[in-house]
Image (cartoon, grey):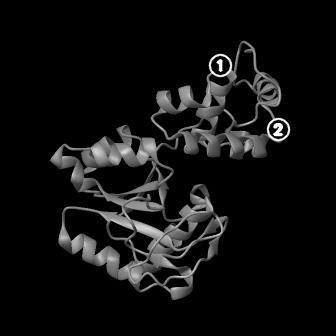
Amino acid sequence: MPSCAAGRVVSGRTGSLECRVVGEHHGPVWVQIATSQPVVELGLRTMLEGADPALGITTTGPPEHEPDVVLYDVILMKEGDTSELDAWVKETSTTVIAVDRTLRPALGAQARTHGVEWGIDLGITAPELLQVIEEAIAGTLEDSSVAQEWDTTEHLGQDSGLSRRESEVLQLVLQGLSNQEIAESMYLSINSVKSYIRSAYRKIEVNSRSQAVIWGMNHGLATQPEEQEDGAGVE
């Protein structure tokens, strides 16, 4: 299997894909399709496999590793077993994107309660799907014209460029929670929490938790300062 500069080993279907960079991502992009309907899987797989080989997209990978992106068909919510979805959302850094069924909004709502933040329509076109995959790997889904962030109500820090999830994580940082406590309370992986903290710090131009507390106090994210260790960063 090829070994990539980021320290991650991912095998394509032929085992011959070369490492590549998409944003800060090194190696082939493993997109896993999760659906109970063969016709849906075939359609999504055909669109992905029709991508420019330079994009390095593969739809399979070794079981000991986690996919970069999961396209999760919300029809699976009907089966009742959400253990695999829960594991992807909470225990990995995988980006889970729901394949939404507009005629069955309750299924999308259920997926949302399990922590899925992004959705695409089942009728998505091949160019749109490839755009979403590239945006997911580059970390720019918030700017996507295709993928939908399901909760679009106003939130604290929005004027400063913070996403809803970054705002929520930052508020818990201000309350003195550790990264592990934040992960548990928000149903996220520890890697996802660290990623949200880094991106939030970058956007508000701070380098430590104590600086983030001061920023939060000045911008209405907290009413009481919490004791923080200066220089703790994202730990």
* Residue 125 falls in image quadrant: bottom left
Placement of the C terminus among the 4 image quadrants: top right
Q: How crowded is mark 1: few (under 14 residues within 10 Å), some or many (20 or more)?
A: some
Nearer to the camera, 126 or 186: 186
Type of amino acid at the residue the image marks with label 1 = Gln
Horizontal and vertical percent for residue 84?
30, 48
* Residue 175 falls in image quadrant: top right
Nearer to the camera, 57 or 121: 57
Q: In this view, does 10 lie above or below 229?
A: below
The residue located at (33%, 48%) in the rendering is 85
Say which residue label 2 marks. Answer: 207
Q: Which mark is residue 175?
A: 1
| Separation (CA) of disc 2 from disc 1 | 17 Å
Q: Earlier in the sequence, mark 2 or mark 1?
A: 1
Q: How crowded is mark 2: few (under 14 residues within 10 Å), some or many (20 or more)?
A: some
Horizontal and vertical percent for residue 146?
49, 65
Residue extending furthest left? Answer: 79
Q: Does residue 27 appear to the left or right of 51 in the view shown?
A: right
Does dot 1 land on a helix, a strand or a loop? loop
Q: Are marks 2 and 1 in contact (CB under 8 Å)?
A: no
Does dot 2 land on a helix, a strand or a loop? loop
